[in-house]
Amino acid sequence: MKILSVNAGSSSLKFTMFELPAGNVLISGNFEKIGIGNSFYSIKLDGEKIVKEKDLKDHSIAVSTLIEELIDNKIVNSLDDIDGIGHRVVHGGPNFKESVLINNAFLEEFKNCIEYAPLHNPAHLMGINAFMEALPNTPQVVVFDTAFHQSMDEEMYLYPLPYEWNEKYHIRRYGAHGTSHRFINKTISEKLDRNDLKVISCHIGNGSSLCAINAGKVVHTSMGFTPLAGTMMGTRSGDVDASIIPFIVQKENKTCEDVLNDLNKKSGLLGVSGVSSDFREVQNGINEGNHRCKLAFKMLCQSIANYIAMYNNMLDGSDVIVFTAGIGENSVTMRRQVIENIKSLGVTIDEEANGKRGEFVLISGKDSKIPVYVLPTNEELMIATDTYNIIK
Ligand code: ADP
């Protein structure tokens, strides 16, 4: 089957087409600056990337251009050859516990989820509508970033806040990156040929989250009601004392929204280093002796290590720790420092193996009490696989 995996943002649309069940990529690409001028798109085919300028007034134009490219490049002969479309959706609220086929009932219920991700969910809906218009007869599926975490127990997802806030407004831990953590759990379980693994999955990218998983069930995840919580990230603070917000509101004569924006967009690596939210640039700063870059690096590694230690405790001992995403897959120094920071768990490093980047590799030492792996994530494939399983 030919399945298209789609991630629609407010001004972008990323896609990858897979042949399933084999899982090979047929074509991928990205439409950018949709509706904001100077729009263009890129297509990756047979290892070659082509960039084309095109006036993309809205998501419908991006979708019709995508379909033209699929036909022109002979990926499909006609629309009928597209067997299914899987859409990434950031937030499924309290009710969506797994991926679902899109129909009228879904669209009605999804309206209730908009408020949980007011920036992302409306953009996903634009993408869904554009594909539904262009391909009304093709089955389409939604894959939620929050769904995997719905398997958490109540005592793990509830906050120690007035109980009615959860009853009235569904204030609770939802987490994010669920599709990535599910992919990591599935893949490491297959590779180690176990279905009862206790996994600590560390998705460390621009946005970062950790997830403790016991035999496929989420025990805990570091992001919370929104993706602001948890470890320190590129621009997000991660966990901080909420009292800081009214304090800064008063001191700087800002609104609550302004300060929240500062926590989301001006904190983390960017806020502490003052240089960049991009890990590689912070690394360059360290090499030049920049104190605040060093500080940002230390704080990032410590906050990841703290979650790993907590999760090892929650799991009553873990079987495996896995690093993934941009920093997790590529940063030799971050992994070395985090492993140093969890040495009380008996974890050791194999320096040579840790030198590898972007591939599946065991990076812990032979004497390590917990094996540590690097495993590249593939959320797009997980979305396509869910779509395939639902429509087949
Ligand atoms: P997003 O959350 O946007 O999906 P990614 O998972 O792509 O983020 O991760 C982006 C982060 O990965 C950036 O901070 C970037 O600097 C970092 N990164 C990418 N490649 C490398 C590398 N070779 N070494 C260290 N960090 C890297």
Image (cartoon, rainbow, N blue to C red):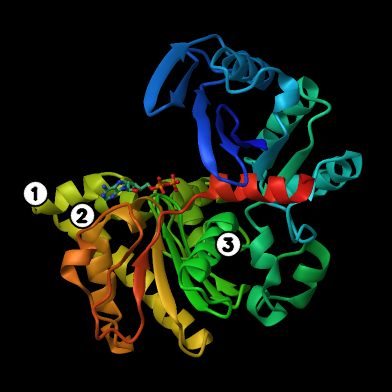
Q: Which amino acid does label 2 sit on?
A: Cys
Query: Callout 2 environment at 10 Å: few (<14), some (14 to 19), or many (20+)?
Result: many
Would the CB of label 2 be found within 8 Å of ligand 1? no
Q: Residues within 10 Å of mark 1 (few under 14, many from 20)?
A: few
> Helix, strand or loop at disc 3?
helix
Q: In this view, does 233 lie to the left or right of 152?
A: left
Residue 173 lies left or right of residue 319; in this view the side is right
The vertical placement of 7 against 46, above or below, is: below
- Front of the two marks 3 and 1: 3
Q: Residue 352 carries which label?
A: none
The residue located at (79%, 36%) in the rendering is: 139
Number of the front mark, 2 or 3: 3
Residue drawn at (27%, 69%), measured in percent from left and top?
A: 363
Which residue corresponds to mark 1?
288
How packed is label 3: few (under 14 Cα within 10 Å), some, or many (20 or more)?
Answer: many
Q: In the figure, residue 157 lies in which quadrant?
A: bottom right
| Residue at numbered disc 3 | 182
Q: x%, y% of residue 217?
A: 64, 74
The alpha-carbon separation of the residues under discs 2 and 3 comes to 32 Å
Residue beneath disc 2: 293
Name the amino acid, label 3: Arg
How far is disc 3 from disc 1 in space, using C-alphas?
A: 38 Å
